[in-house]
Amino acid sequence: MPNFMMSHPLTLTQILEHAYRIHADKQVTTLLPNGTLHRYDYATLYERVQSLANALSQLGVQCGDRIATYASNTYQHLELYYAIPCLGAVLHPLNVRLSPVQLTQIIHEAEDKLVFVDSAYAVQFQALQDKIDSIRPVYFGPKSTDTDPCYEQLLSEAEPAYTWDIGDENSPMGLCYTSGTHGEPRGVLYTHRSMYLHTLAANQADVFGLTEADVVLPIVPMFHAMAWGLPYASMFTGADIVLPGAKPSSIATLIADTGVTVAAGVPTVWAAAYPEFRKRRADISTLRRLIVGGEAMPPSLIEVYEKELGVEICHAWGMTEMSPTGTLSKLRAVHQNLTDTEKWRIKAKQGRPIPGVELRLAAETTDGFKELPWDGKTVGELQVRSPWTANRYYKIERTPEHFTTDGWLRTGDLATIDVEGYVQIVDRAKALIRSGGESISSVALETALLKHPDVCEAAVVGIPDEKWGERPVAVVVCTEKTSENISDILRQQLASEFPKFWIPDTFIFVDKIPKTSVGKSDKRSILAQLIGTQNPTKKLNIQPSRKEIEIC
């Protein structure tokens, strides 16, 4: 039977064209480093994106080329979010919080052709530039040298009109990297089709629920899994966008000055902002919803936002591999008669799968995986699949460690799912610590610590932290020849390989590390003994090998 429907590729050019033709007057506002607000409309953005596409072509960018960004949330970065993929190239946002060593590895694997550098990070970028001297930088601000092109100059010299020509919806559009079990960077290559479908799903009423009347503030960095898809979801609905730049001095002031209705970020941001929000309740009265992800938001924080500030909390879960949204926790109609405490308990869960996402709980057996019941009690590995979930990693062979033979992504999270479909993450099979919404690989830190000749054993665990969610603690067994300043030495060694926020807050030196029955570090036992004490070593079975705990 012939196909009676039009075959029209699902590409980001459709989002850009729709935003321009239907919502041309909607605003994009950026907080500049000097504290002023830069404003223009979608029509101006569209014109600049066309010029930028021509400028990229003049620089030799071709279909499939990877183009990196080293930038904060600004209007220039938003322009690159559209110009690069709509040209046919691949947008590669770099995580500015990673160390030069990590970024160098990622950039070389991606084979980036250009890197666009935010003026806010120009000094920081210098530590990286010597390691990637073959890649040409383009600066948002003034030129750093006579040979480096300037972003605004490129636009001013480019032709003003560009004809989009993305014929294949399965063409790659974006590349984001995520930490793995052993700390190795793993790239996820999104396609136009996958991001278009993720955008449609995110804009469902029971997901992000954005409308043309909204003013959206993505505090989540644009280098975090495409800012959770908000740059595309917002413009498709015609919402105004507010971009906070690198370091907004006051989120409350930004909300008050721009009338933000929906904001998105990790719990750490909202925990820090709450005291000021409470004082300036009248100033932030337009704010009606927070999209929260990256790590679990405590029920107590959900309660104060909803009860005291009248701001709805939409608790989400996802992964870079999922573009990234997978579940979102909203109350059902049948929950309206529950007590407030019961409602907040539900909202603290990771939520139900959004339309298009399939979940299953599984236990590994000799014959593959056995599916487990959704009873809210049985714990299993959470596995997912959807039209916007990766089925392999960039330049890495597909392995059973990450993907099942029947097509599911193994998230590495251990969870329960209740009869209503609400997911509750209970543990991580992956050795990752979540701090301020960022992933820290405990295995990578342990491997680095063991490189030092004075270290015999090392175990790194994440302990709860009010501000950051989790922070790493290193438990170390040293040789007899250990120097007195070993903690400083180890700290310096880790700092040469990892970003500052990866470095453990506390180094605890012991004679022995608890082990499991198979001889591995018993991290459950270590955590159980560390949590709830001001002096962690007092809870360890073995006395510390030093008189005092080393604390940075």
Image (cartoon, grey):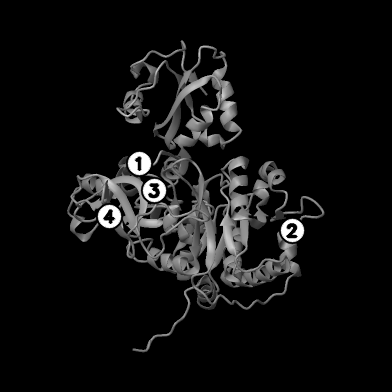
Mark drawn on residue 401: 3
For the residue labelled by badge 3, is the local secondary structure a helix, a strand or a loop?
Answer: loop
Left or right, 331 with respect to 257, comes to left
Place of residue 202 in the rendered image (x, y in percent of width and height, measured from the top left): 39, 63
Q: Earlier in the sequence, mark 2 or mark 3?
A: 2
Q: CA distance from mark 1 to mark 2?
A: 45 Å
Q: Residue at x 61, y 51 (%)?
A: 107
- Residue under numbered circle 2: 150
Q: Position of residue 393 (x, y in %)?
A: 48, 55
Give the farthest residue toward the front.
Answer: 366
Q: Nearer the viewer, residue 60 or 98?
A: 60
Q: Nearer the viewer, mark 4 or mark 2?
A: 4
Number of numbered markers: 4
Image marks 4 and 2: residues in contact by CB distance under 8 Å = no
| Residue at numbered disc 1 | 429
The reply, left or right, for residue 228 in relation to residue 378 is right
Q: Which residue is mark 4?
A: 360
Name the amino acid type tagged 4: Arg
Kind of residue sitting beneath label 2: Cys
Q: Amino acid at mark 3?
A: Glu
User: Where residue 199 appears, x then y in whole percent?
Assistant: 43, 66
Which residue is at a point 51% across and 44% down the rendered structure image?
A: 184
Give above or below for 327 relative to 532: below
Residue 23 in picture, x, y percent from top left: 51, 74
The amino acid beneath tag 1 is: Ala
Q: Nearer the viewer, mark 3 or mark 1?
A: 3
**Residue at 62% across, 41% down:** 100
- C-alpha separation, residue under disc 2 versus residue under disc 3: 44 Å
Indicate the quadrant containing the N terminus: top left, top right, bottom left or bottom right: bottom left
